[in-house]
Amino acid sequence: MSVIEARQLEKTYVAGDITVNAIRKVDFTIEPASFVSFIGPSGSGKSTLLNMIGALDPPTSGTLNVVGQEITTLNRKDAATFRGDNIGFVFQDFNLIPVLTVFENVEYPLLMVQNWPKEKRRTRVLDMLEAVGMADQANKYPSQISGGQKQRVAVARALVTNAKLVLADEPTANLDRETANKIITLMKRMRDEFKTTFIFSTHDPKIVQNVETTFTLEDGKIITSNNNAGGSHV
Amino acid sequence: MFNIIKLATRNLQRYKRRTFLTSMLITLGVVAVLLFISVSGSFKAMMIGQITDSMLGHMQIHKKGYLASVDSLPLNRNLNAKQINKVKEILGAEESIEAYSMRIKLGAMFSNFTETTNIRLNAVLPKEELGAAPLLTDRIIDGEKEGLIEKGEILVPELIAKGMKVNVGDTIVLVANNKDGSVNGQTFIVRGILEGISGPGGRDGMIHLDDAKSLLRMDEPEISEIAIRLKNIDQLPAVFAKMKTELESLKNKDDKPIFEVHTWEKISPFFNIAKMIDLMTLFIKIMLVAIVLVSIMNVMIMAVYERINEIGTISAIGTSPGKILGLFIIEGFLLGVLGTFIGVAISLISITAMNASQISFDFGRQTGLMLSPTISAGEVITVALIVIGISVAASLQPAYKASKMDPITALRHV
């Protein structure tokens, strides 16, 4: 069963007299545990598509089934619950909470979203920090670690809830070449280890080289789909 | 909930200086209100205590219409023997009454044998009077205090004593008209000098009730005023209502009420000052509310604006709108609690310090009154609840805005 199935997905923004068709009736499926990227020039609709998959932005029309649930009809609260239960996010600017330590940042979704019991939570967070190589930095604050380390923490936070899907919007854009490579390698290892689907919106050729499927968008349409591993298709 | 409190606390610590300044502003407001309440409350309680305990009593009973013409001290509006007995019967059955005093109020000519002036007098039975006005002896600034007064003696008001140059032990003459117009005179020994206080009767002299009867040539007992002291002043509204119903239901032959009952509040102009103090306290409380409202709202609006991206992040990773709302409300709540806690602590220390330093003040002609500010736990709790409640209310709008923020827009915010 596909982890994502989109049919005739459309997103239109209306601002005054201007209507922008950000996504134009696209169809695609993505299989579980795949490594997928959406690429395209600025304004092509990559981020809009990622936002819709992440239940952050409802489509104007079409259907969108993510991890077995039709998400186009979710209200605000249910969408938040759905995200908390199923989706992890990795942002370009890392978006760690500055007043929380590394440990607490990773713990946050378990504590504030999923209400895990304390001991189970602690074990899980330490396991994830160990997995991303940040266990020894657990008590530091985000301001005390490097950009690459922040992104490792963000990956740990995205995966800590056993998310079935991780959405990463330009995850390497603010990292140097070497660190970016390490983050990509880390995410691929995480995919292999936890069988999580990773979907990127990116301009980074390094990511494109590493993914199994690349969807190229232009003017809100998927114009090509390059499938290296046969995991996803248009 | 504990986790939200923990996160809110961390967020407040993020901007230490701002949190400190906002808390201090709230603290300042709380201190101002609590100190004003304690000082004004002390002043009010002292003045009420002095007025009721050294002169008026808590309640007074007169013949209907007496109070309206009290300035002329009308002897034809005195209660007769039958009416006095009826009042005694009712007062005797009321357990909350501690004591009452029968008074004859009269005007007379006061002569020191070289000069003459007008004087207003209260004629009393000393034991009864001391029961109804136990602090009366404190007003005797010269002369014997014990026993208040005996037959043939007079307590002269301070102003008249000075003006007429009479001293304790001097002989004076009182000349009075009775209600039939007959004039009578009687000599008295000055037993003491009575300090004047603010309010009606505060500058009256005092003689023994039996002397008034002989001076006014009363064949039968007559009484102008019955001053009543309750065991507990807090019972005043209930006792007053009961007395009023009971006494004012008694009618004369023309089916009109015989008696009128008044509390000290109706009789003394100080009640209006007390009401003004209460009004000022209310305005100070309103100012406190405004300070808290503006400062907390300002801080919380800033907090939301500065953390838009963070709100987007926590919303994206699944934090429910309700928890985001709660997070910001608790930040406002904690600011209010912090400011209130410090404010209450400073206020209590200040009140203790003021009491220890024995501050005195003057009120009208009264000098050297000791300021002894006190504040009840109820007042402290009320002010604390107001401040904390307003802190929460002031956080509602920014918190609501944060909870309703579109995560995509928030994440794009730089």
Image: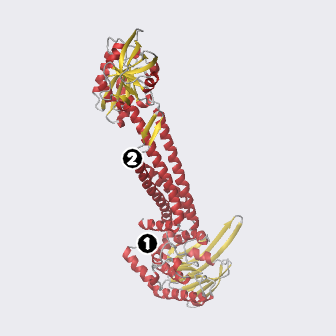
In the image, what residue occupies the spot 52% across and 86% down?
A: A187
Q: Chain of mark 2?
A: B
Residue A222 horizontal side relative to residue A193, left or right: right
Q: Are tags 1 and 2 found on a single chain?
A: no
Percent position (x, y) of residue A160?
46, 79
In the image, what residue occupies the spot 57% across and 69% down?
A: B407
- Amino acid carrying mark 1 in the image: Leu
Percent position (x, y) of residue B116?
46, 16
- Amino acid carrying mark 2 in the image: Ser
Is residue B404 visible in the rendered structure shown here?
Answer: no
In the image, what residue occupies the spot 46% across and 18% down?
A: B117
Q: Which mark is residue B376?
A: 2
What kind of element bears circle 2?
A: loop
Question: Is residue B358 or residue B209 the one in the foreground?
Answer: B358
The quadrant of the rendering that contains the N terminus of chain B is bottom left
Instruction: Determine whether A175 is above or below A60 in the image.
Output: below
Q: Are marks 1 and 2 in contact (CB under 8 Å)?
A: no
What kind of element bears circle 1?
A: helix
Question: Is residue B152 or residue A171 the one in the foreground?
Answer: B152
Which quarter of the picture shows residue A211?
bottom right
Is residue B350 visible in the rendered structure shown here?
Answer: yes
Instruction: Determine whether B227 is above or below B282 in the image.
Output: above
Q: CA distance from mark 1 to mark 2?
A: 42 Å
Question: Is residue A30 or residue B275 the one in the foreground?
Answer: B275
Q: Which mark is residue A111?
A: 1
Q: Chain of mark 1?
A: A
In the image, what residue occupies the spot 61% across and 88% down?
A: A226
